[in-house]
Amino acid sequence: MIAELPFGFWLQIVARKYEKLLWVPHVHKAFPNITTDRMGLFARLDRIRELRNRIAHHERILHFNLPLEYANAIEVIKWICPVTASWVDSANRVKDNLS
């Protein structure tokens, strides 16, 4: 079921309208290592969503700073689990193609 939820769903559960209902009592616990507030997380996730959608729809991404976007995505994963972030960073070839 979780795998079937669109990326936008995860973005929306950290949106301002759910701050009191979801973020404060529950969702913030999913990010034990976060170094920003809910708004910063929302902005980061929205940027990841935008890049992901452009790639998925075969749209132009040359104007993105791809090394920065990659680093930001890894950082968001670190906010959830540093071990997973380390694994993702070492187990893919994205960085090899950014230079």
Image (cartoon, rainbow, N blue to C red):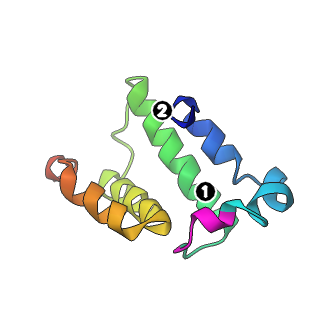
Secondary element type, mark 2: helix
Please tell me how crowded label 1 is: few (under 14), some (14-19), or many (20+) other residues with Cα within 10 Å.
some
Label 2, on which residue? Answer: 53
76 to the left or right of 12: left
The quarter of the picture where residue 69 lies is bottom left
The quarter of the picture where residue 70 lies is bottom left
The quarter of the picture where residue 2 lies is top right
Establish if 67 lies above or below 38. Answer: above
56 to the left or right of 29: left
* Numbered label attached to residue 9: none
Q: Which residues are magenta?
A: 28-33
Q: Is 86 included in the stretch rendered in magenta?
A: no
| Amino acid type, callout 1 | Ala
Residue 79: image x %, image y %? 49, 68
Establish if 8 lies above or below 98. Answer: above
Establish if 32 lies above or below 77. Answer: below
Establish if 45 lies above or below 25. Answer: above
Residue sitting at x 52%, y 49%: 47
Residue 53: image x %, image y %? 48, 32
Q: Nearer the viewer, residue 71 or 90?
A: 90
Residue 98: image x %, image y %? 20, 50
6 to the left or right of 88: right
Residue sitting at x 70%, y 49%: 13
